[in-house]
Image (cartoon, rainbow, N blue to C red):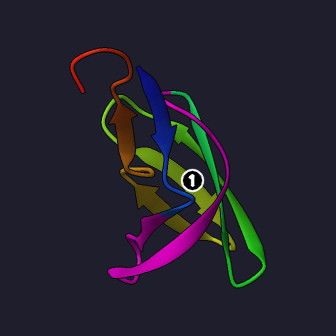
């Protein structure tokens, strides 16, 4: 079984109630997420439900990238 994550995810600015697609720069499930939005890097930490980070005085949240599981071996 292989697990991989998409290279993009949705990020919401909670202060402005806006959601955009961002490029995932670095990600460790249930630990941290770094995304790039318009050349700005946003570092986010997992709080048990979502990733949360701050940049330029604004708060951002994300569910993180979508996980894909590929089953390998017999019977596929």
Q: Position of residue 50 (x, y in %)?
A: 36, 43
How many C-alpha atoms fall within 10 Å of the one at disc 1: few (<14), some, or many (≥20)? some
Q: Which residue bears the numbered disc 1?
A: 53
Residue in the picture at 55% in, 72% down: 22
Q: Position of residue 27 (x, y in %)?
A: 62, 41
Residue in the picture at 57% in, 59% down: 7
Furthest-top residue in view? 74
Residue in the picture at 37% in, 50% down: 66
**Magenta segment, which residues?**
9-30
Q: Nearer the viewer, residue 23 or 43?
A: 23
Q: Is residue 3 shown left or right of residue 57? A: left
Q: Nearer the viewer, residue 76 or 47?
A: 76
Q: Nearer the viewer, residue 44 or 58?
A: 44
Magenta segment main secondary structure: strand
Q: Is residue 8 shown left or right of residue 23? A: left
The secondary element bearing badge 1 is classed as strand
Residue 71 in the image: above or below residue 42: above
User: Where is residue 58, by image quadrant?
Assistant: bottom right
Residue 24 in the image: above or below residue 2: below
Answer whether residue 23 is magenta in the image: yes
Residue 9 in the image: above or below residue 68: below
Q: Is residue 28 shown left or right of residue 61? A: right
Q: Position of residue 62 (x, y in %)?
A: 41, 56
Answer whether residue 12 is magenta in the image: yes
**Numbered-mark total:** 1
Image quarter where the C terminus lies is top left
Residue 5 in the image: above or below residue 55: above
Residue in the picture at 41% in, 20% down: 1
Q: Position of residue 28 (x, y in %)?
A: 59, 32
């Amino acid at each position: 079984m292989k697990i991989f994550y998409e290279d993009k995810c949705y990020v919401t600015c909670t202060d402005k109630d806006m959601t955009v697609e961002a490029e995932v720069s670095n990600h460790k499930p249930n630990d941290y997420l770094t995304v790039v939005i318009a050349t700005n890097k946003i570092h986010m930490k997992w709080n048990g439900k979502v990733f949360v980070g701050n940049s330029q005085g604004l708060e951002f949240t994300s569910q993180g990238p979508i996980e894909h599981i590929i089953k390998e071996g017999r019977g596929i």
